[in-house]
Image (cartoon, rainbow, N blue to C red):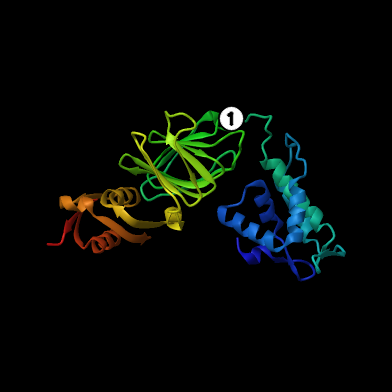
Amino acid sequence: MTEDRINRSSPGGEPAPDWDAIARHVTGESSVEEDAQVRQWLEQHPGERALVDRLNEVAVPSEPADVDVEAALRHVHTRMNDTRRPVLTLEQGGGRWRSAVGVLLAAAAAVVLFATLHRASPDVEPTAAPQTFATAVGERKTIVLSDSTRVVLGPDSRLAVPAAYATARAVELRGDAYFDVRHDAAHPFAVHVNGALIEDIGTTFTVESDAGDTTSVSVISGSVRLRAAASDAADGAVLAAGDRGSITKDGSIRAFPHSAGADDAAWVSGRLVFRDASFSRVGAELRRWYGIELRAGNPELLRHHVTTTLEGESADQALKILGLSLGARVERRGDTATVYLAP
């Protein structure tokens, strides 16, 4: 969503809000990018933000009525675009916002309609079947769970969502994933991965679980508790925004405060960023993203580390970049690439 889309012209020729985008924001239906843009726009427009806050407090029926969604939305848009209505002027923070009479009502109708259709009643337990999501080599997939938690599943990864997810929010992961969790203190969110348990405390975080016996977590916002799945609830380490942590299969945990950054989630947009990454770590990523098995032609290569970035290159180009980073020669035969240190 762009700023131009948010600031559509009102009948008076002045910027007017995109209520569809704002409605998605209120009900948790926005993409991560759109949600951030709407939040920024609302911060810059306190009058509209106050209206949205009031709309967000509107009591929504616990069970949505039998609504013709498409017809209702068409009706809302008709009312919003009807330029024949007389003009209403609203005072806002020393400025004036002109709009057709009924635009605010239409906006309210849009927000309430979205809320009615998308907010599940806490008293109604939806029926669901277990679901499994999987990606192929080089593929990413975005998944929106029933509670609006968003997951970006990395290549060659698998996410299992049990039938009881609505009441016990726990999923099982193999591979890599980015989680943007809808926090619910009454129903905590947890990820089971490789013998570890990652528990949300209102969070956006990434999980990487394909490097040998180690699972790594980078916290973008909020915080998580990282512990062994078989340990007590109070065990483990709490990682806050900007922290990274790792846990091995034997339960050993290491925390790296203030070491996480944008690069840790760069793979969500297709960029592989290696910062002092081990040879085995690079090999695991090449296998998942390119389907290539990386082998060390010299044992000492296993002690080398790589710092480089891959962004949409072909497999051959990626191997060439890797060779230059290591000062090594790479020989590829089919899906196997062997790296040799230069003599």
* Residue 104 falls left or right of residue 216: right
Residue nearest the viewer, comparing 336 with 223: 223
The answer to whether residue 152 is visible is no
Q: In which quadrant of the rendered view does residue 7 lie?
A: bottom right
Residue nearest the viewer, comparing 236 with 137: 236
Residue 9's x, y, as percent? 73, 67
Figure label count: 1
Q: Amino acid at mark 1?
A: Thr
115 lies above or below 274: above
Of the 4 image quadrants, the one containing the C terminus is bottom left
Residue 180's x, y, as percent? 53, 46
Q: Residue furthest right?
A: 86
Of the 4 image quadrants, the one containing the N terminus is bottom right
Q: Residue at x 44, y 53 (%)?
A: 260
Q: Residue furthest bottom?
A: 13
Tell me the SS state at disc 1: loop
Residue nearest the viewer, comparing 64 with 94: 94
Residue indicated by mark 1? 167
Residue 107's x, y, as percent? 76, 54
Q: Residue at x 45, y 56 (%)?
A: 261
* Residue 53 falls left or right of residue 333: right
Q: Residue at x 35, y 57 (%)?
A: 275
Q: Residues within 10 Å of mark 1 (few under 14, many from 20)?
A: few
* Residue 265 falls left or right of residue 248: right
* Residue 190 falls left or right of residue 158: right
Residue 303's x, y, as percent? 22, 51
The answer to whether residue 246 is visible is yes
